[in-house]
Image: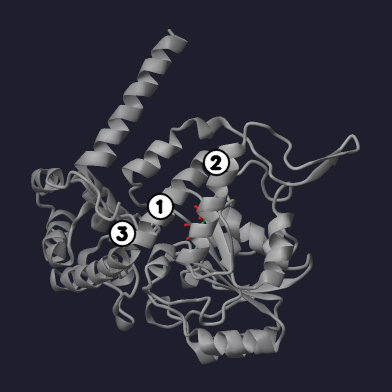
């Protein structure tokens, strides 16, 4: 017999509780695409704002000029203004918007409004650690753009400034899209920006993975290094609710971009998310520097410790990483242990250690929990014992996890 609706409601409640207990209390989350949202920011996600609209865009309706299509928005509009101002301060930018619903939507927002239809972009291909969304058939085909390859052929998918600059001068695109999903090392932005501006191309930087590090003064400072527009997800190294933001110093570009978003890329911007993001932005203004420093230091320590434990790790021009990510060396893991990253990740998941199936490990959420750089050796030894040697580390993982009861930097 099919379950009744009431039974399905009870099952749904059980599933959400079980998820919260498991992911919130029983595991170390080392997925670099995720983070833990602070208690206050979570509270705002569940506030009344979750069901509300505002559209503070002047329109003419029946001959009457309206400031907003909705009433009831007196606090919502102030919340947006507060979050936007905090984003501008945190990234030292003249202009900001916190409206994009995700990193992908931020990318769509930037490219749809600043690159003409039929135009050409250069992006790092997925085979070199680039984001799948920029591959032909995805964002470029949605927006009627063609895409060429921005090379990232160094160790750890590092970008060589001269090689990238030569590709830009050869291809003369409308925009160069920087950013990777496998993102270990900062870019040599000087030669890239010079070449792009020489051929009249914009430089836009998808910081989805490293946004929290940039906010905290780590990794690199794209706007000061000449990038035109910086955007990304607000929930990977940036420890906020799922969403996106865009910042720029180029007021001329922002005047084109910002008014063109609503009704082209999205309508309602989800104001509970924006209140929650506002809280995270303020938290990072308060202690983002210490957070970002600790995340990167932990990633470097963890990479070194994993290699010592016999887990093969990708290394590049500057050690294992300068970001929150570490990459397992897939060919070396196959050769030395006959093990794929998928099988390794599933083994670790059963022991309460979450890494992703494509071999990325991240330190952002562990840092928020309070795991310190000097404890990375212990984490590395659990990962190696559970993943490579098949030892039963689950009980130790759970006992250690229970000692972290609140979030730092929140
Ligand atoms: C570089 C990059 N850009 C954009 C995205 C999409 O982000 P979101 O999931 O916030 O839409 C991702 C997702 O992993 C990414 O790695």
Residue 259 pos. (x, y %): 73, 56
Q: Which mark is residue 364?
A: 3
**Of label 3 and label 1, which has the lower sequence position?**
1
Q: Earlier in the sequence, mark 3 or mark 2?
A: 2
Q: Which image quarter: residue 316?
A: bottom left
Q: Where is residue 194? Give x, y as percent.
A: 60, 89
Q: Quadrant of residue 8?
A: top left
Q: Is residue 34 left or right of residue 265?
A: left
What residue is rendered at 35% in x and 54% in y? Answer: 357
Say above or below: 393 vs 173: above
Badge 1: residue crowd in 10 Å (few <14, some 14–19, many ≥20): many
Residue 257 coordinates in the image, percent (x, y): 70, 62
Query: 200 or 339, which is in the foreground?
Result: 200
Instruction: Tell me how far mark 1 sits from mark 2, CA to CA.
Output: 14 Å
SS of the residue at dot 2? helix
Label 3 vs label 2, nearer the camera: 2
Look at the numbered disc 3 and give the secondary structure of its residue.
helix
Q: Which residue is mark 1?
A: 280
Residue at x 25%, y 67% (from the top left corner): 294
Given this view, does label 3 or label 1 mark the residue nearer the observer? 1
Decide if ligand 1 comes within 8 Å of the CB at mark 1.
Answer: no
Figure quadrant of the N terminus = top left
Q: Is residue 39 above or below residue 223?
A: above
Quick check: marks 3 and 2 in contact, CB under 8 Å? Answer: no
**Res. 271 mark:** 2
Q: Is residue 207 left or right of residue 361?
A: right
Callout 2: CB less than 8 Å from ligand 1: no
What residue is drawn where x is 74% and y is 36%? Answer: 69
């Amino acid at each position: 017999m099919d379950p009744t609706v009431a039974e399905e409601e009870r099952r749904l409640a059980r599933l959400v509780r079980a998820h919260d207990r498991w992911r919130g209390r029983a595991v170390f989350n080392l997925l670099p695409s995720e983070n833990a949202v602070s208690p206050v920011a979570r509270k705002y996600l569940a506030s009344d704002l979750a069901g509300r609209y505002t559209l503070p865009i002047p329109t003419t309706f029946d001959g009457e000029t309206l400031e907003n299509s909705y009433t009831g928005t007196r606090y919502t509009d102030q919340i947006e203004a507060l979050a936007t101002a905090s984003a501008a301060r945190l990234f030292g930018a003249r202009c900001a918007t916190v409206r994009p619903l995700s990193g992908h939507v931020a990318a769509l927002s930037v490219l749809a409004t600043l690159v003409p239809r039929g135009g050409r972009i250069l992006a790092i291909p997925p085979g070199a650690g680039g984001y799948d969304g920029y591959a032909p058939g995805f964002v470029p085909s949605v927006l009627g753009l063609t895409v060429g390859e921005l090379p990232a052929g160094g160790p750890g998918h590092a970008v060589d400034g001269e090689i990238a600059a030569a590709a830009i001068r050869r291809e003369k695109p409308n925009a160069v899209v920087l950013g990777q999903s496998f993102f270990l090392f900062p870019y040599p932005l000087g030669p890239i920006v010079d070449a792009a501006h020489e051929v009249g191309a914009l430089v836009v930087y998808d910081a989805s993975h490293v946004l929290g590090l940039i906010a905290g003064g780590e990794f690199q400072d794209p706007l000061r290094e000449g990038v035109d527009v910086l955007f990304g997800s607000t929930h990977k190294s940036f420890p906020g609710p799922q969403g996106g933001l865009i910042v720029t110093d180029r007021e001329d570009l922002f005047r084109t971009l910002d008014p063109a978003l609503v009704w082209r890329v999205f309508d309602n911007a989800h104001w509970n998310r924006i209140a929650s993001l506002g809280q995270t932005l303020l938290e990072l203004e308060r202690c983002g520097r210490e957070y970002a420093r600790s995340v990167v230091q932990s990633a470097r320590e963890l990479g070194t410790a994993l290699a010592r434990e016999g887990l093969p790790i990708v290394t590049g021009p500057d050690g294992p990483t300068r970001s929150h990510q570490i990459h397992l060396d897939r060919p070396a893991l196959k050769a030395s242990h006959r093990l794929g990253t998928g099988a390794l990740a599933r083994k670790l998941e059963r022991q309460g250690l979450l890494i992703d199936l494509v071999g990325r490990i991240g330190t952002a959420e562990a840092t928020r929990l309070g795991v310190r750089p000097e404890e990375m050796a212990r984490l590395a030894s659990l990962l190696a014992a559970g993943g490579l040697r098949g030892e039963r580390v689950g009980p130790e993982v759970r006992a250690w996890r229970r000692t972290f009861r609140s979030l730092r930097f929140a």
